[in-house]
Image (cartoon, grey):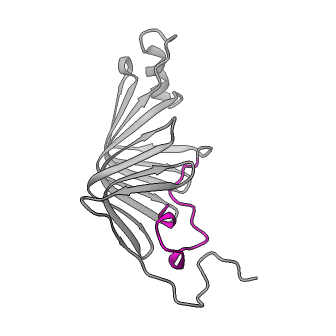
Amino acid sequence: LLLGVVPASAQSTSQSGLKLSGDKPIQIESDKLEVRQAESVAVFTGNVSVVQGPTLLKAGKMTVYYVKDPNAAKGAAAGASAMTGSANIDHLVVENRVYIKSNDQIATGDSGNFDMKTQVLVLQGKEVVLSQGDNVLKGCKLTVQMKSGLGNVEGCPRVIMMFKPQKPGAQQQGASSN
């Protein structure tokens, strides 16, 4: 993700950006879980941690909104599948100090949401920080297309980027030595 905005001299060939591992199992841990069957919602609170493949998400609270099945009897099926984790997720909302790490990239912010259909992550707050090694990008809103890893940062009022250029002749991280 950061590669799209960092000059070529600072690029590394091994980065893939913030992306999902859609085929990997998801592990969610929290201090408390509240399932609202009629609303097709599950609320995880207290030290929430979500791991899928190389991606880790931490937050104080995560609300999972499930796709409502029009054929289900008054939300019973959605609630039951929310308890077992087998429901289709519509979107997630994370709050209270959000931290996302994927491979060597880290993004932090106050709150965020993730739309499962469009695969778009929006992280926002007083200061949203995206870092990759010595490279740091700051703004107030980060929008990431998780399928492609492409992102957009909005400033507050300006975007701030700090990067460490590679020394001339230095081998890029992840480049082959053939």
**Total of numbered circles in the picture?**
0
At 62% from the left and 44% from the top, the residue drawn is 23
In the rendering, at what x and y percent does residue 121 appear?
43, 46
Residue placed most toward the observer, 10 or 40: 10
Front position in the image: 147 or 45: 147
Q: Nearer the viewer, residue 10 or 73?
A: 10
Q: Tell me where the magenta segment starts and ends, as one range.
A: 1-21
Q: Is residue 13 magenta?
A: yes
Vertical placement of residue 60 versus 159, above or below: above
Q: Is residue 11 above or below residue 31?
A: below
Residue placed furthest toward the right: 178
69 sits left or right of 38 in the view: right
Query: In this picture, is 37 found above or below 106?
Result: above
Task: Assess whether residue 78 is covered by the magenta stretch.
Answer: no
Tell me which corner region of the image, top left, top right, bottom left or bottom right, holds residue 16.
bottom right
The residue sitting at 43% across, 35% down in the picture is 91
* Residue 176, horizontal then vertical, whole percent: 70, 78
Q: Residue 110 location, x and y as percent?
A: 27, 51
Q: What's the residue at 76%, 82% (across, down)?
A: 178
Say left or right for 99 vs 168.
left
